[in-house]
Image (cartoon, rainbow, N blue to C red):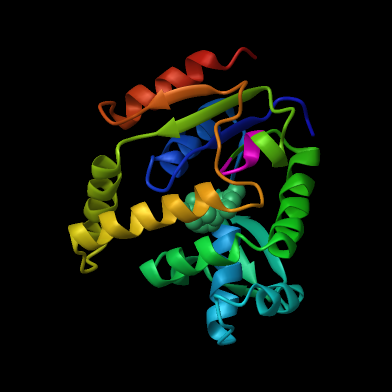
Amino acid sequence: MSGFDIAIDGPAGAGKSTIAKLVAKEKNMIYVDTGAMYRAMALYMLRNKVDLEDRDAIAGKCQGAEITIKYQDGVQCVFLNGENVNDLIRTEEVSIAASKTSAVPEVRKKLVSLQQELAITESVVMDGRDIGTKVLPNARLKIFLTASTKVRARRRFDELLEKGMKADLMEIEKDIKERDRMDMTRAESPLVQAPDSVLLDTSDMSIKEVADKIISLVDW
Ligand code: DC
């Protein structure tokens, strides 16, 4: 680890990736979206028709998924067995599948090592669920970003509409609650606030306010 990493954790839709990208740009650091790796793994399971309730099947299959990260024009691209899957991993189906597959210890082991490798040579702003607690326990700054379920659902709804996709607010809120439940109650690296992290509730904050707040906490 470079010793100057920023870990941003929190539930789905708290604004982690938007904020992490802004902070990384401002501080000239590399942004790593770990959720995208779990999403690529979930896509692999869906494509291979693995039963997502069968943890042994997921554990057995995950070694066949070669997941790598590359940066193209500063944008993180996640590759699944050589294919850029960035545009295929943002659907609700993949979101739910990622929440399920990410609970399997073998999946986490594989992706956590990859994430730790990425931080060896570079100073990173990494976002996810277990970055401050597990992936980068020595991160110089740890943030726990959260917001109310209603606000998170509304943000996701607006994001989908902006992309021209169909969305149902009630359905999204239900999915977010279900993902929170799965992410927080799993046995392996559940989503919890690291004791040495700064808690930021972004429900009533603008993107700029949150980014400015985090940048003000960076002491290097
Ligand atoms: O951040 P995201 O919504 O793209 O993440 C997708 C899923 O991946 C999420 O439901 C939980 C899982 N995840 C995880 O378990 N650990 C991480 N570090 C990042 C994501």
Question: Residue at position x 74%, y 27% from top?
Answer: 138
Q: What is the quadrant of the C terminus in the image?
A: top right
Q: Quadrant of residue 8?
A: top right
Is 71 one of the magenta-colored residues?
no
For this rendering, which residue is in front, 191 or 81?
191
Count of residue discs: 0
Q: Quadrant of residue 63?
A: bottom right
Image coordinates for residue 32, horizontal then vertical, percent: 60, 46
Q: What is the quadrant of the N terminus in the image?
A: top right
Q: Quadrant of residue 81?
A: bottom right
Image coordinates for residue 182, horizontal then vertical, percent: 49, 56
In the image, residue 66 sits, relative to residue 46, either above or below, namely: above
Q: Is residue 219 visible?
A: yes
Give the magenta range.
Answer: 127-132
Taking the view exactly as shown, the residue that stands out farthest to the bottom is: 49
In the image, residue 156 sits, relative to residue 61, either above or below, namely: above
Question: Residue at position x 66%, y 35% from top?
Answer: 133
For this rendering, which residue is in front, 6 or 74?
6
